[in-house]
Amino acid sequence: MRRTMKETAMSRREVLAGGAAAFAAMTAGLAGCAGTTSRPQAAGSGPPKPQITVLYDAFGKAAAMQKDWGYAALIESSGKRILFDTGNNGDILAQNAKAKGIDLSTLDFVVMSHRHGDHMGGLAYLLRVNPPVKIYAPKEGFGVYGADLPSTFYRKDDSLLPQERYYDGAPPQVMRFGAAWPGANFQLIDKNTEIAPGVHLISLVSDKPGTLELRELSLAIDSPDGALIIVGCSHPGIEKIVETATAINPRIHFVGGGFHLVVSNDADTERIVTSLRDKFNVGYVAPGHCTGEPTFTALKRAFSGHYLYAGLGTTFALGPTPSPIAAAGQNAVTAMDEDDLKHYRALLARSNDDGHTLFGHAAGCCRRS
């Protein structure tokens, strides 16, 4: 049954009260992490604390990190260190990882959400520092991450001479096609797949104008508190991604990344935000990248204390009550200010996708009068 906004607020207060003790225990354990980096822990010290660090985005407070349009995040959960996307530029990714003390040579694996440059631009740098790392990427026909097809895909004509036929009439059973990064350890995904215990990739295809047939992977991690979802650009639709994740765990605890509503009008934005809150009962949101300024505002209004600031350089702890972790000598940032907005708008104005406006139509359509 659909909850009223009042019931939703009461439910959230109950959750916060019930989780206070658990949160106190969790923050006590994280106290030593405040202001530290996300370097891998020493052998025998156990798995890393469950947390997410934003390594690439167009807004944020970390002075030593460079803002740019794109997305990358390090997820440490379920005993794994996962790099999700690589941002727009390898030099910037390198600078930002160094600023956070993150060693990209020690990853368990990488997830590339889709083939757009602002998500894969740092891949060449990553492969220089970590050549053998396994990279999960969407499988597309003749895609930049490589592809393969059974040779039965094309029609044969036995009446031709061998020299007139492909492979002299004896093609390999599987025809493999090159990637833009030869030698990279790509594993191509074209269906929902559990890649490690409790770690799932959601594979969907966009049906939106401008990105029609674009394949995109989202990350869903099962946790005791519900599913943790990380999205790159949500081209197939953030609602569709979340709905698919409910098959993994019907309780959606956390959604972070790019919601792809940066040019949506107010009515569509409000409908989607309300759906995330009331239909899917999402516990916490940590939007960034292509979510859009009006959507940041709408999500803050709808989710209140369950809205997490996720600007560049932010690290937030996961658990019953996700929250930002303060850097040394600093309070945790909890909101976007005018400086954030200035950088975000400037980088959005400069962004470009395959020679066209980034999202297929004018960015001004989302501005409030």
Image: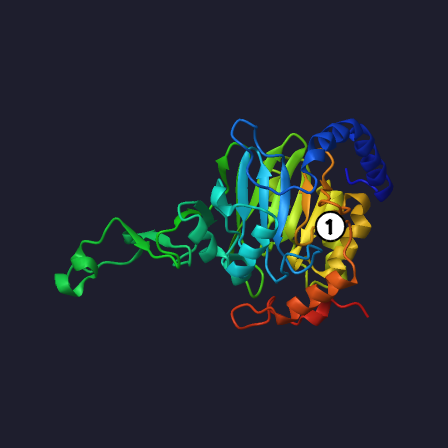
Q: Is residue 302 above or below residue 12?
A: below
Residue 171: image x %, image y %?
22, 54
Would you say residue 126 is visible in this rendering? yes
Would you say residue 260 is visible in this rendering? no
Residue 239: image x %, image y %?
65, 49
Residue on which the image places disc 1: 309
In terms of image quadrants, where is residue 296?
A: bottom right
Q: Is residue 252 above or below residue 349?
A: above
Q: In this rendering, would 320 be left or right of 202?
A: right
- From the viewer's side, name the closer residue of 286 and 358: 286
Q: In this rendering, would 10 be left or right of 281?
A: right
- From the viewer's side, name the closer residue of 68 and 97: 97
Which residue occupies 39% across, 51% down? 184
Q: Name the image colouring.
A: rainbow
Residue 238: image x %, image y %?
64, 51
Count the numbered circles shown.
Answer: 1
Which residue occupies 78% across, 55% down? 298
The N terminus sits in image quarter: top right
Residue with the most extreme front position: 329
Element carrying mark 1: loop
The C terminus sits in image quarter: bottom right
Residue 115: image x %, image y %?
49, 58
Q: Is residue 311 above or below residue 264?
A: above
Q: Identify the amino acid type marked 1.
A: Tyr
Q: 10 Å neighbourhood of mark 1: few (<14), some, or many (≥20)?
A: many
Q: In this rendering, would 43 be left or right of 294?
A: left
In terms of image quadrants, where is residue 228?
A: top right
Which residue occupies 61% across, 62% down? 69
- From the viewer's side, name the closer residue of 278 and 84: 84
